[in-house]
Image: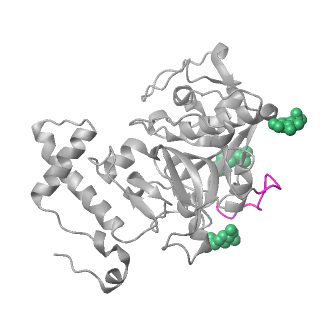
Amino acid sequence: MKVLSVLCALLITVATAKQELSESQYRDAFTDWMISNQKSYSSSEFITRYNIFKTNFDYIEEWNSKGSETVLGLNKMADITNEEYRSLYLGKPFDASSLIGTKEEILFSNKFSSTVDWRKKGAVTHVKNQQSCSGCWSFSATGATEGAHKLANNGTNELVSLSEQNLIDCSTPFGNTGCNGGVITYAFEYIISNGGIDTEKSYPFEGTDGTCRYKSENSGATISSYVNVTFGSESSLESAVNVNPVACSIDASHSSFLFYKSGIYFEPACSRTNLDHGVLVVGYGTENSQSQDSSSEPNHSNYWIAKNSWGINGYILMSKDRDNMCGISTLASFPIV
Ligand SMILES: *[C@@H]1O[C@H](CO)[C@@H](O)[C@H](O)[C@H]1NC(C)=O
Ligand SMILES: *[C@@H]1O[C@H](CO)[C@@H](O)[C@H](O)[C@H]1NC(C)=O
Ligand SMILES: *[C@@H]1O[C@H](CO)[C@@H](O)[C@H](O)[C@H]1NC(C)=O
């Protein structure tokens, strides 16, 4: 039996504090989860996946019992370990520690709106599914390029969904390694040098590395250059998000990111320099601070809206103005048409 700490007893969260489940309760939870996620296993694999599920279940229950502003929940990835998650979905960590604080801060706009949401301006395509391919870098690169293309010509262009597979198959000479990982700016360099990127429709996502099949007649957008947000500056990132959706690299290695369900994502263990995932920041905002946990610290209600493959319909609200949490502003860039 878990003994409740005195602190915990003082909070209203007592009702949801962690309870050990009986074996049959875990079994029921697992079979319910299997049904709702349409999973089936061979009998030898069942036990392995069941044990992993139990560990993840406990992790989520324990996290949620602590009254964090981040709420976790079981999702379709609840049967994989943290190691499997990192190898299936994330890239090899990129060490950006030497870059932080090396540049003078650049602002890209004088206009700082109190909130930005490019989805409402029709500059963001539907959420795409990266599947079990560590090609997240290609999704943030297409997302930022889709936004730049749409917003060029005073917003009169059409929103065109662009091809991640094109980047995965063709940007290897620029230093990327397809479904084994890549760097967003290398993808921009490929698009510039190639003179375009194909549409999603003509070159759909396959989730594995293939040979380069770019066809200039299917090109959906071009860019002439790109800019970097000042390494590690959230003000620089904020000014950039006023201009365009921004492709950001983050530390997503923690299970809390994998099981994010709602609230503002805050992970005290997150690194600002060890970056293994790409997302697209499409805006920012502030939560109505009626919530009890965050009222004392104003910055705790600020968030970035990050387009991902999973989360709230594919989006994760990431902590903003909390000391560059998870490195959101460490390696961030957007293209110029
Ligand atoms: C750009 O679009 C806005 C509204 O969408 C319009 O008010 C403005 O005049 C346009 N600017 C130019 C240079 O066409
Ligand atoms: C942007 O940052 C990346 C990563 O440090 C670097 O490789 C690239 O040269 C920079 N590009 C520009 C245009 O500043
Ligand atoms: C809180 O936000 C303000 C700007 O909104 C910023 O100047 C300050 O550094 C932030 N505090 C932390 C701890 O990040």
Q: Residue furthest front?
A: 290
Residue 124 position in % (x across, y down): 62, 37
Quadrant location of the N terminus?
bottom left
Question: Looking at the picture, how far across and down is residue 22, in whole percent?
Answer: 12, 62
211 falls in the magenta region: no
Residue 81, percent from left and from top: 29, 51
Residue at the (59%, 55%) spot, across then down: 304
Q: Position of residue 181 (x, y in %)?
A: 48, 40
* Relative horizontal placement of residue 12, taking residue 139 as reference (left or right): left
Task: State the residue in front, 18 or 108.
Answer: 18
Q: Measuring 46% from the left and 23% from the top, which residue is drawn there? A: 210
Q: In this view of the protein, can residue 230 be seen by the observer? A: no
Does any portion of residue 59 appear in the rendered image? Answer: yes
Q: Residue at x 30, y 67 (%)?
A: 62
Question: Is residue 108 a member of the stretch shown in magenta?
Answer: yes
**Horizontal side, residue 81 vs residue 271: left or right:** left
Query: Which region shows up in magenta?
Result: 100-112
What color scheme is it?
Answer: one colour
Looking at the image, residue 292 sits to the left or right of residue 217; the answer is left
Q: How many marks?
A: 0
Residue furthest out toward the bottom: 6
- Towards the viewer: 25 or 139: 25
**Predominant SS of the magenta segment:** loop
**Quadrant of the rendered structure where residue 141 is?**
top right
Ligand 3 lies in quarter: bottom right
What quarter of the picture does the C terminus occupy? top right
- Is residue 155 positioned above or below 279 on the image? above
Vertical side of 160 occupied by 70: above or below:
below
